[in-house]
Amino acid sequence: MVLESCSVKRLLLLIIFIGGITLLIFIKITSSSALSGLNATIATETSEGVKDHKNSSNKCWLREENTILKECHLCSDKLECINASYVETIKCKISGLAYRNCRKPTIRTSEKEFWLFQGSQFVIAVISLSVIQYKKKQFHKKLMKRIQKQLDSVV
C-alpha cells in the first residue's frame, strides 16, 4: 500500500540504502574477531561426533578449562593427523596438549552465500518494483478510462 504511493526514485533509494546498511554490517562482522570465535564454536560442536585422535580420546576440552593454542588449521604433523585433515591444537589445564578434529574454515563459503543471497534479494526487489509500477500504470489507465467515460456521459 505505502510502496505503491512512492515514486520509483524513492524506491530505488530505499533499496540502495538498505543494501548499504547490509554491506556495512557484513564488513563489520567479517573484520571482527567474532567470526573466528564463531568458527571455533562451530568446530567444537561438530568435532564431538567425529572420531578423535589417540591422545585426545578423553576429550579433555569438555571437562577441563582449556585454551586454543592454534585455530583450525591444515595438519602438518603425523601425530596431529590421524583421521582428519584439519585440527585444532588445544591445551587442557590438567591433561595437557590435545588435538581436536574440526572442519575446514568456511569464511569464503559464507561470503559466497552472503553475496548470492544479496544478489537474489536485489533481483527480487527489482522484479517487485517492476510489478508494482506495471500494476500502478494499469490502475491509472483504468481510472482514466472511467473518468473519460463519465465525462462523455455528461456531455
Image (tube, rainbow, N blue to C red):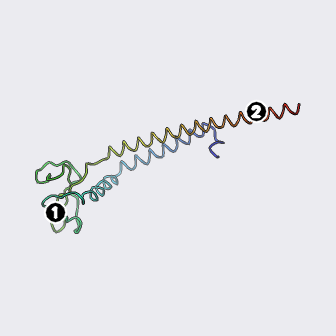
Closer to the camera, 5 or 147? 147
Tell me the number on the disc at residue 154: none
Return the residue found at the far left. 78
Across and down, in percent, residue 119 comes to 45, 39
Q: CA distance from mark 1 to mark 2?
A: 80 Å
Q: What percent of the width, then of the height, locates residue 126?
A: 53, 37
Instruction: Give the SS element for disc 2.
Output: helix
* Disc ID at residue 57: 1
Image quarter hosting the C terminus: top right
Horizontal side, residue 25 vs residue 56: left or right: right
Q: Which amino acid type is shown beneath numbered disc 2? A: Lys
Q: Nearer the viewer, residue 101 or 139?
A: 139
Q: Which residue: 12% across, 50% down?
A: 77
Residue 140 x, y percent position in the rendering: 70, 35
- Residue beneath the point at 72% across and 35% down: 142
State which mark lies toward you, 1 or 2.
2
Give the x, y percent position of residue 86: 20, 50
Residue ID for mark 2: 145
For the point 64% across and 42% down, which residue is it? 4
